[in-house]
Image (tube, grey):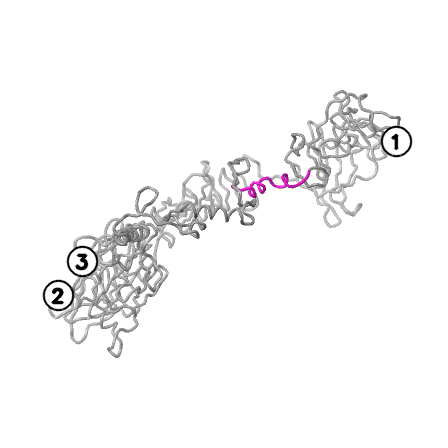
Amino acid sequence: MAIRFIVTDAGRAALTNDDNTGTGARRIAEIGLGSGQYTAGDRTRTDLVDPIKRMDTIGGETVAPDIIHVTLQDETNDTYSVGEIGLFLDNGVLFAYTSQPNDWIIEKAAPATLLLATDIEIADIDVSSLTFGDAAFLNPPASETVLGVVEIATQDEVDAGTDRRRAIVPRTLKAFIDKVLKAYATVQQLADHAASRNHPAANTTNQGMVELATYQETKDGADNTRAVTPAANKAALDQHRQETGAHAADRISLGDLPKLGGPSTVQAAFAALGTAARRDEGAGKGLDADKLDGLDSERFMRSDVANSVLLLGNREAGDVKEDGAVIFDHSHGIYVYMTSPPIGTEGPYAVMTAATTQAGNNIEITGGKSKDSIPTISVKQGSGSGLDADKLDGLQASQFIRSDAKSQLKGELQVDSDQGLIIVYRSAGGLRLSGFANGETHFIHGPEGNGDDIFRITRRGKRSYEVSVGNGGGFSELWHANNLNPVKVGAANQTVGDGFHVNGNKFYFGTDGNKEHNLFDNDGAGNAGLQFGMDKDKSTAVGGAVEFQADIDNSDNSAWRISLDSRKRNKGDSINFDQELVGSRSGLQWNGNNIWHEGDAARSRGTSGYVKNPDGTIIQWGEVNNRSGGNSGGAYDTWKIGFPITFPNACRQVIPSFGNLQFGGSSRAMLCAEQLENNRFQLAIGAEQPYSGQTVRYIAVGY
C-alpha cells in the first residue's frame, strides 16, 4: 500500500518549469525524518515540525505518474522514532511530507540498520520528472514499463479481475480457468440437450441417444460417442487382414515380460534381449557374456593389464617339474623350477627375499618384496655396526691420536674451524707444559710464526711465572696481584686514583669528606639509581637537587622518577623533595596527578564532531542547515537537533549561534537551546519576518 504525501506550495512551485506550462526536472536529494505526529494537510509548510535528521543514503524511481518508489538506509547507531517524513529537493525546498497522529511510522534501535522501502502516492501532480541522487538502494514496484517487486494476487482478486498491480500465479489462474470451463460446459450441455430435442446422449455410464458410426469412423477408431455396427466392424477387420505389415514385429503385442523390462511388442522384446538374441556364439562372433562358467572377469588373470593380486596354492617342491613354473611352498617359500639353470643342475631355485633369508650380523638383505624387484645384499658399516676392520683408510690404529690412552703428536696441529681449538678440562686435569725449567721462556706465536709473538711465558720458580703480551716488537707484562694493588672486594672505604671513592654502597667523585657529586647509590633494598649534585641524606652542593631512579622489579611500581627540592637551601641543609615527576606503565604523573596527552582523548573532527577529555567531560559541536520559518506575529519555530554522540550521563549546556544572516530588512531574530536531553536538544528561532536557508551552529558540554 502506497503512503500518501502532501505536496507543499513551495514544492509545487519548484517543480513548475520556466514556461509555467508543466513540470520541470528536479532531484530529490534528501529525506528528512522527524518525531512530530499530526494530520498532514498544511501545504504552506517549509520544514518538518520536529526534525530528527536528514539523510542522503536514498534511492528511488518514478514508477507511475502518481507513484514514487523510495528506499532509505541508515547504518548509524542513532536511536529514534519517526512520526513524520519529508522529501527535500536539491535546492533545499520541502517538496512533500506526510505524518500520522496516533502511531509511529517506523522506529530504529541503536544496533540496528534502518532499511525503509515504500511507495509514495502523490495524486495531485505529475511526478514523472523527479529523479533521485542514488539508485543503489532501489527496489521499485513492478509496472507495465518498470521492472521491480510485485505482490501476488489472491484468488478473490483474480476472480474479480479489477486489480492492475498484482500478479497471477499458475495455481490461481488454473482455478479461475476451471471455473470458466465448468460454466461453459454447463451452458454447452444445455445447448446440446436443446438441440437433441431434450433427449440426453448415451455414454459409458448412462443410457441415451446414440449416433451410428460410419465405416471410416470405425476404421479410424478415434470417435468415442458413436456406436459401431457389426457390418462396419467386419469390414474393418477384413481390410486389416489384407494390409501389408499388419502383423509386423512392431505391431504384435505381447504379454507381461518383467525380466525384459515389460516390452509391449515383439520388436521391443528383441531390443531388450540385445546381441545375445541375434548373434552366434563362439570365437570371433562378438558375444559379450556376463560370466564365464559362473565366474566374473575379475576372478581371472589378465594379459593386457596389470594384475593386483596373484594367489598361489601350496605345492611341495617335488610336485611340479615344469621349466619356468613359479611355485609356492610352505616349507621353502616361493621358488622357480628351472630345467637349464645358468649355474647348477635342474631343480627348484628359491626366490630370495628379506623376509625368507637369514644372514650374518653384519650382512643385511633388503628388497625382494612389496614393489621392489631385486634383493640387495649390503654389509653394515659405521658407528654401532660392530664391524672390526684391519685398517681405516689404509692406516693402522697406531697412527691416530687416541682419546683413551697416551699418544704422541709429531709435527703441527692445524685446526680448520671458525671456533678454533677448544680444550675441555675434566675432573682435576688441565693443560700441562712439560720440560719447562726455571728461567726458561716459551712463546705463543701468531699466524706468521717466530717473531709474531702473542704471549711470552717465563718460569721464575714453582708456581711463579711471568706472562707478557706482545706489544709492537716488545713485551708488556700483565698485571696481577703481585704488581698491582686494586680496590679490594668488601673494603669499607677505598680510594682509586685522584678523588674516585668507594664508600659502602656509594660510588662517587670528590676530594673532601663531604662526598660531593655522588654518582651511584644503592640503598641496600634493591633500589639502585643515579644521583647528581647531592647526597641522599644531606644537601652537599649549592643549587637544586635532582635524583634519577629506576625500577628493577616486575611490579607496577614507578619505572623511574625525577625528584626535585625546589626550595632555596644552604649547604648542609636536609633535603625535602617537594616536586616529583614519575613514569610508570600506566603513564606519567606530576606530584600525583596524571599528565594528559593527545592519545588520551577520543575525538571526531568533522563539521559535526566531539572530543572526550580523560576526566569524562565531553564537548560536542554541530551545524544545522536550511532552517526556514518566521512570521510577523511573534511566533517561533522549533526543531529537535541530535548530537553527534550521546552523552552517557547528562548534557549540561548548549550554546547556539547564527552561522549566517538570512533575515531581511530591520527584522529582529533570536534563538535559544531548550529541552536538553542526552542525545538531542530543541532549537528555537523567533523572527519577525519569514526566512529560509538559515544556518545555525552550536557547542554542547556534558559528561
Q: What's the CA distance linking mark 3 and mark 2?
A: 16 Å
Residue 528 in the figure: left or right of residue 684: right
Give the residue type that dot 1 points to: Pro
User: Where does residue 510 sit, x and y in percent of width and height?
Assistant: 50, 46
User: Where does residue 494 sit, x and y in percent of width and height?
Assistant: 54, 39
Q: Is residue 396 visible?
A: yes
Q: Which residues are magenta?
A: 264-280
User: Where does residue 508 sit, x and y in percent of width and height?
Assistant: 50, 44
Callout 2: SS = loop
Given the current orientation, which residue lies at the most extreme bottom position?
A: 19
- The circle drawn on residue 342 is 1
Q: What's the CA distance linking mark 1 and mark 3?
A: 118 Å
Give the residue type that dot 3 points to: Glu
Residue matched to label 3: 674
Where 340 sits versus 90, above or below? above
Q: Earlier in the sequence, mark 1 or mark 2?
A: 1
Give the residue type that dot 2 points to: Ala
Residue matched to label 2: 635
